[in-house]
Amino acid sequence: MTDTEPPAHDAIVLAGGAARRLGGADKPSVRVGGRPLLGRVLTACAGARNTVVVAAPRPTSRPVRWTREDPPGGGPVAALDAGLRHTTADRVVVLSADLPFLEEATVERLLTALHTSGTDAALLTDADGRDQPLVAAYRTAPLRRALSALAEEGDGPGLTGLPLRRLTAALDLTRVPDPLASFDCDTWDDIADARARIREHGHVLDEWISAVKDELGIDLDVDTGVLLDLARDAAHGVARPAAPLTTFLVGYAAAQGKGGPEAVAEAARKAAALALRWEEEANAAEQPTPGKPAPDPGPGR
C-alpha cells in the first residue's frame, strides 16, 4: 500500500428498516433499473474486504455476512453497532440499502477523503447540504468509542431508538457534497423518480450492462465502446443481423478462453477485422475488373 492509497476497509449495509413510508414494503428488494436496491448498493461496495448486511437474510448477488440488531427494529445506531461487531478493518463504509445512484467511485472518494483528511469520518451531504451519515466512511476506533459512550449515557436500553445525529456529533467529520449519490428512496415517489432518472442521466447503457451482469452473475469490466464499434462494423460490412450474433460469439469466445476484459477486446478486434475484410470484398465485387466489359443490362434497360 502506498502513502496515497487508502487502507483495506469493510462495509456495513443497513437494510432492516420498517419502510413505513413505503407501506411496509420490503424496500431493499424494490427494483430500480431492474436491480434490487440492496443489490445496487452491494455492487457499489464491492471493493470491501468484508461486507456485513444488517437485516433478515435473503438471496444476494454478492457474498455477505448477515446479522441483526437486538431487538430487531432498534434503529440505525443499534443496527450500525451490530454490524460493526463483525468487522475487523480500521476503516468501514456505512451505507443504507436505498441508494439507487451510489457507485463504487463514490465509495472510493469517501475513503480517499477519510484517508487524506485525518478526521474520524467522511460523509456525503445531499442537495440541501444535510449530512448523510449512512453514506459515509468511518475510522472504526473512534466510531466504536462513540458508540460505547452513547450506550453508557443513554436513558433507555442501550442504543435502541437513538438518532444518528447523536453519534455523529461526537465525531470529527469531513463532508463531501454529492446530491446524486446521496439520493435515497423513502417513498414511492422517490422510487418513481429514481426509475425515471436512471433513463435520463445519460448512463442508460452503463445501467443496463450492470443490470445484465448482476442478473447473469458475472463480474467483468465491459468496454461498451469496443462492442458497439464491432456491432456497427458487422452490421455495415456484413448484414444487420450479424451485429448481435457477432457480439454474442465474441463473448462466447472470451468465456471459452476464461479470459477477462483483455480477451473480450482481442476477440472483438479479430471479429472487427474480419467484418472489414468482408466489406472490402463486397466493395471490390461492385467495381468493374480492368479490361473486362461491364455486364450487359439486357433489352430495354
Image: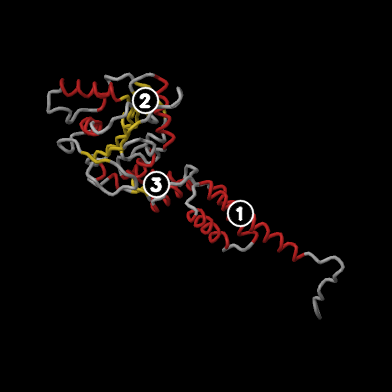
User: Residue 20, can we see it?
Assistant: no
Mark 1 surroundings: few (<14), some (14-19) or many (≥20) residues within 10 A: few
Residue denoted by label 3: 195
> Can you give x and y, in whole percent of width and height, for residue 146 in the image?
24, 21
> Can you give x and y, in whole percent of width and height, for residue 38 in the image?
32, 43
Mark found first going from the N terminus, 2 or 1: 2
Of the two numbered discs 2 and 1 in the rendering, the one whose residue sits closer to the viewer: 1
Mark found first going from the N terminus, 1 or 3: 3
Mark found first going from the N terminus, 2 or 3: 2
Classify residue 295 as left or right of residue 43.
right
> Can you give x and y, in whole percent of width and height, for residue 137 in the image?
35, 28
Q: Disc 1 versus disc 3: distance between alpha carbons?
A: 38 Å
Identity, as a three-letter code, of the amino acid under mark 3? Arg
Q: Which mark is residue 270?
A: 1
Q: Nearer the viewer, residue 187 or 106?
A: 106
Of the two numbered discs 1 and 3 in the rendering, the one whose residue sits closer to the viewer: 1
Q: Which mark is residue 122?
A: 2
